[in-house]
Amino acid sequence: MAQQRILTGITPSGTPHLGNYAGAIRPAVEASRQADAESFYFLSDYHALIKTGDPERVQRSTLEIAATWLAAGLRPERVWFYRQSDIPEIPELTWLLTCVTGKGLLNRAHAYKAAVDKNAADAADPDAGVTMGLFMYPLLMAADILIFNADKVPVGRDQVQHLEMARDIAASFNHRYGAHFALPEAAVDESVATLPGLDGRKMSKSYDNTIPLFAPTAELKKRVFGILTDAKAPGEPKETEGSPLFQLYQAFASADETRAMRVRFQEGIAWGEAKEVLFDKLEAVIAPMRARYEELIAEPERIEQVLKSGAERLRAKYAIPFIARLREAVGLRRLDRALATKTPARPKPQARPQFKQYGEADGRFYFKFIDGDGRLLLQSQGFASPRVAGQAVAAIGRGSDFAPWAELAPGATADDVARACEALRAG
Ligand code: TRP
């Protein structure tokens, strides 16, 4: 069997903090050392343009994040490590996918809907401040994944919907042009640490409670001593449960060290001393990486070289031949060859078509109708309750028109839906 392909993108915006390291960078670097997968890690700098219009910031952040991953132990000779904007086949594929994707699919993307909802709350125009970049984000992300036919995509919870969309988009393309894409799956690792920040809430740039991964030693110390604690005096037993200080320690210490720290909490270690222990631990883990990081940052031409070489090899091996096949498939062809006389037959559905009902983060309930080969046929609007959504499904099943509740996906016909309903009713 071919090696599994694991792919993930890192958007270069902002400075990486301890939470990014423990939650994303460290597990990814560890996974990349396993030999049974082919891994793709890339800097999604096209995505960064959606979030910021500041060119210096994009450049600086790309450099910093590339250096961070290399300093954290990513081995560019063992994994594919590249920059999205060095692969022109990605935006090219984005367009091919755009043409088989319903606008309705993108209307439902969480980030876009959140912007529209906010505008509604502010009594502004629904699309005020919404760029086409924000709107098309899921399509660009689908192209990132599909250009290398990735099987598994490690992402955070917030990205799961984008993976669902990538599958829908891939299935639409496959249905129209033949089976070119594998359907990718999200891999959400529930076991990776979500680190608390200085104030005990999740460490996040938006809460301004982070500890930058490569802060200089003095600043690291200052931040650690700024971690929120309760008012328990030295000698009083302290709770480990819910203590940000303890959780941070646990994320960087061994199991034995963590056990010992637990005992010291019970014995009433003074907060000042606990902070000292945490700082020493962090410094021990981070200092060697920080030194490598600083060396790397001082030689940007080396990083540039690593990224360029990754992209070049990757394009030659996969992206260029694959986009050539896709261009051929959609009819972007040489003119001096005989015209193809017929388009290939539709692939036969492998499994029974099905209705899927699901809730979304917007609190509404949806259904969709999926063909046996995974192709999206019908997509509903949002309903206030699962019951109302279920009634609409039932009505369609009885043969009434779907138009009041749902729209056809591009490439699907009312006939497709009728046949699928038939098959459903039959058994
Ligand atoms: N959207 C992802 C994020 O903000 C980054 C990303 C871009 C990505 N392209 C991707 C992740 C492809 C996985 C696969 O976190």
Image: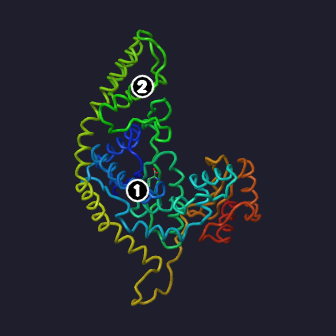
- In terms of image quadrants, where is residue 425? bottom right
Tell me, for residue 245, which label it has, or none: 2
- Beta carbon at label 1 within 8 Å of ligand 1: yes
- In terms of image quadrants, where is residue 334? bottom left
Describe the element under mark 2 as helix, strand or loop: helix
- Beta carbon at label 2 within 8 Å of ligand 1: no
For the view shown, which residue lies furthest in the top direction?
A: 235
Relative to residue 75, is residue 59 drawn left or right?
right
- Residue 115, placed above or below residue 196: below
Neighbourhood count class around disc 1 (C-alpha, 10 Å): few under 14, some 14–19, many 20 upward: many
- Residue 316, placed above or below residue 37: below
Residue type highlighted by circle 2: Leu
Describe the element under mark 1 as helix, strand or loop: loop
User: Residue at the spot x=51%, y=50% of the render?
Assistant: 160
Q: Nearer the viewer, residue 151 or 162?
A: 162
Q: Position of residue 109 (x, y in %)?
A: 58, 55
- In terms of image quadrants, where is residue 408? bottom right
Neighbourhood count class around disc 2 (C-alpha, 10 Å): few under 14, some 14–19, many 20 upward: many
Q: Position of residue 265 (x, y in %)?
A: 40, 16
- Residue 132, placed above or below residue 122: below
Please tell me which of labels 2 and 1 falls first in the chain.
1
Q: Position of residue 330 (x, y in %)?
A: 47, 77
Q: Which residue is mark 1?
A: 44
Q: Nearer the viewer, residue 301 or 259?
A: 301
Q: Position of residue 287 (x, y in %)?
A: 26, 35
Q: Nearer the viewer, residue 144 or 308?
A: 308
Q: CA distance from mark 2 to mark 1?
A: 33 Å
Assign the C terminus to one quadrant of the image: bottom right
Decide if residue 426 is in sight here: yes
Relative to residue 115, is residue 328 drawn left or right?
left
Residue type highlighted by circle 1: Ser
User: Residue at the spot x=72%, y=49% of the render?
Assistant: 384
